[in-house]
Image (cartoon, rainbow, N blue to C red):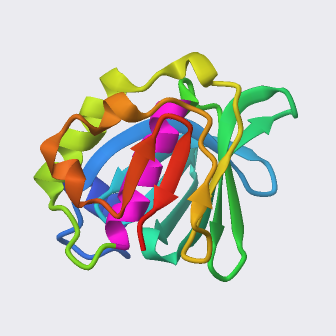
Amino acid sequence: SFQIRDEDFNNIFSDLPSNEQLIVSYPCAWRKEILMHGRMFLSVNYICFYTCFLKWKESLSIAYKDIASVTREKSAKVLPNAIKLRKRNHEQYFFASFIPRERIYIAVFRLWQNALLEQPLNYEQLRAIVFADQFNIDESSEDSEGSIEGEHHNQYPVNVSLSRCFAARSLQHLPFHILETGVKRLL
């Protein structure tokens, strides 16, 4: 399995604060002009992507606070292995080749929601939640689609059973609760 140290993460993404901590990374592809295979890095406050092919390098960093929506997507219109991020300024970013997608989608969702809290969870709490989810997410609805949008929506369609994901006590502090049929934001 691929592992990267925080020092290497901070060297690759030198534009981020030096104390930014990496939680997890996944192989994926970012569709810019072309599909670029690389790695998605999820840290406490940012979602990042990096690719390096021969001497060509490309990187991307998006603050979770700048994200307006996270959507399950299909690549090539049939493969349920993609996620689209839409920023508040309406820029969109399409990431594909996720196997399994649901685990990564939930990790991105959790970190995004945490960044919006007045008192966000710390690194250790986030890492524990994300890694617990890696073993608890039901991938049986992997072909489902749904989106989770920002502050202007009170109901979020999520076509996956998420009740088991919330076993960790620290999750009670997140600004939403899970129902068997969806996610509702508490106002």
Q: Is residue 112 magenta?
A: yes
Q: Residue at x 32, y 42 (%)?
A: 24
Give percent across and percent down for residue 144: 70, 31
Give percent across and percent down for residue 70: 60, 56
Using residue 179 as the reference point, say whether residue 78 is left or right of it.
right
In this rendered view, identify the residue nearer to me: 165 or 17.
165
Give percent across and percent down for residue 172: 22, 53
In this rendered view, identify the residue nearer to me: 184 or 89.
184
Give percent across and percent down for residue 42: 38, 52
Q: Which image quarter holds the N terminus?
A: top left
Using residue 180 as the reference point, say whether residue 19 is left or right of it.
left
Magenta stretch, residue numbers: 102-116
Q: Which image quarter holds the C terminus?
A: bottom left
Please name the predominant secondary structure of the magenta segment in the image.
helix
Q: Residue at x 86, y 33 (%)?
A: 76
Using residue 15 as the reference point, say whether residue 102 is left or right of it.
right
Which residue occupies the extreme top position in the image?
Answer: 140
Q: Residue at x 40, y 63 (%)?
A: 113
